[in-house]
Amino acid sequence: MIITVTACGAESNAPAAPTPITPEVDPIAPPPADEDEEYDGPPVFVPPSDVLPTKPADVIRYWSDGIRHITMATWWDIFYDSSHQDIWDNPDVTNVETAQMSMDALRRAEQEHNVYFEWVNMTWDGIVENIRISIMSGVPDAEIYMVDTQWGIPLALSGFATSLEEMGLEGTDVFGENLVMESLKLPGQDETYLFRPSGFANNLYSLGYNKDMVAARGLEDPQDLWNRGEWTWDVWRHYIRELTDPTQDIYGYAGVFTVFSDMILWSNNAKIAGGPQQTLDSPEVMEVLQFIYDIYNVDRSARPWDPDVDFWDGNNSIYAEGRSAFWITAPWIHQDREVNFEFGIIPFPIGPSGDQATMATRGAEGNFFFIPRFIKNPREVYDAFYDYTNWFNFDTTFRDEAEHEWPRNVYETEENWDIFMQMQNRQGFDFFRFLGLDFNLTLLMTYTTHDAEHTPASFVETYKQVLQDALDWYFN
């Protein structure tokens, strides 16, 4: 449960403006239209068609002896629940002390709240299907659902979740100190639906980079530039151009577009949909779109996005083969790949409208929970879950030290760990990826099969109205 630039030793640290590379291909142009394909007009927002029944919250499940049964739905195996009697029921125990503390907290919560906890692995696709079918029937199959923000936010805004305010939780820890539980307050919304155990963000994303490639090119280490406040878009653009070698299929940057989209926006103090009004056409966002367009289509130093390969392995994890100098990383990503080079992590560079001191470096995305509509006495469920997750008994120092162990080992060096810790509490949020719209920034990222579908200006003109229509629907 419990992401002129000088070589080392040179006299000047001032970066020079990048010089565009002349592409070895024809100038960028939209792909030729299929003569048999009819133009359907601009994209249109189609509101979700979910219709929830009008009925009281009357779903409650008991064992035969009157113990309330709390089913917690997820998409992987989680330990522990009431079926487990020993810490070694978890085959992957690494810390005996914290495992026993988790088991002890489970037993206390069972007794205090007279409940039986059960984790149910519904799989990723299964849990999304179950939420829609069972909640729309008026009889949810779980008292608590784990959700990913990309589909959990639209479901919450569409009425599938019970709000924390409705449960009388205003003024409690989840809205205050966040010692045990934290919530995700969506901008412009009066109600709050998503919550999760608070603590260390192990899933925090950053830029990973190949230190050996950087040093071999005579470039200064990005961590040193960050520490001096000189890690900027212009510097990074210069670096990835210098580290691109198309003859060897090596690019300066290759990474998944979802995390890239968020982080590059925040690095320039920009949001596409930070609240009820779209800001896709704001000057800060236009700077972001132009920068993306330039590194993919002018410099061609970012690997073209390929929708036909595995999302992570095909577009991001090729760094392990030495085929990209920078990539998107997180502890869970790096742990899954063995590399034969020294690596570093670094925040995204600072944009022309950005501010290193205030820019967001951690997304609100990830895994949250909600209690679905129609669950009777949902506060009883929340309180039992709260006590169950408080395995550290409010000793956050102990909790944080335990949670630091794994990522610290994964990231190996003190320099990497220091950067990781700097990024922890600078959270950003943007609605645009959570609105169920069929658009994303890959349309500027040069597919492998053709050139970019849009210029920054045409992208904005095509999508700003459909984006506003979606925001109007969800916020009203």
Image (cartoon, helix red, strand yellow):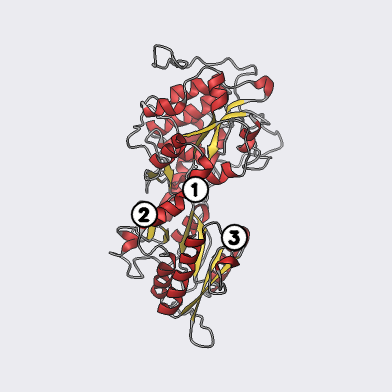
Which label was assigned to residue 397?
Answer: 2
- What residue is shown with label 1? 203
In 3D space, how far apart are the residues under numbered discs 1 and 3 (Cα atoms)? 16 Å
- Residue at left 35%, top 62%? 394
Cβ atoms under marks 1 and 3 closer than 8 Å? no
Q: Nearer the viewer, residue 8 or 309?
A: 8
Query: How many numbered circles does the render carry?
Result: 3
- Left or right for 190, reference 31: left
Q: Nearer the viewer, residue 181 or 365?
A: 181
For numbered disc 2, what is the local secondary structure? Answer: helix
- Left or right for 179, reference 76: left
- Residue at left 66%, top 42%? 310
* Quadrant hosting residue 180: bottom left
- What residue is shown with label 3? 76
Q: Residue furthest front?
A: 97
Is residue 122 in sight in this rendering?
Answer: yes
For numbered disc 1, what is the local secondary structure? Answer: loop
Image coordinates of residue 315 in percent, x first then y, are 62, 37
Mark closer to the chain start, 3 or 2: 3
Q: Residue furthest top?
A: 11
In 3D space, how far apart are the residues under numbered discs 3 and 2 (Cα atoms)? 28 Å
Q: Residue furthest bottom?
A: 65
Mark closer to the chain start, 1 or 3: 3
* Quadrant hosting residue 281: top left
* Quadrant hosting residue 37: top right
Q: Is residue 308 above or below residue 52?
A: above
Image coordinates of residue 215 in percent, x first then y, are 53, 21
Amino acid marked by disc 1: Asn
* CA neighbours of label 2 inside 10 A, class few (<14), some (14 to 19), many (20+): few
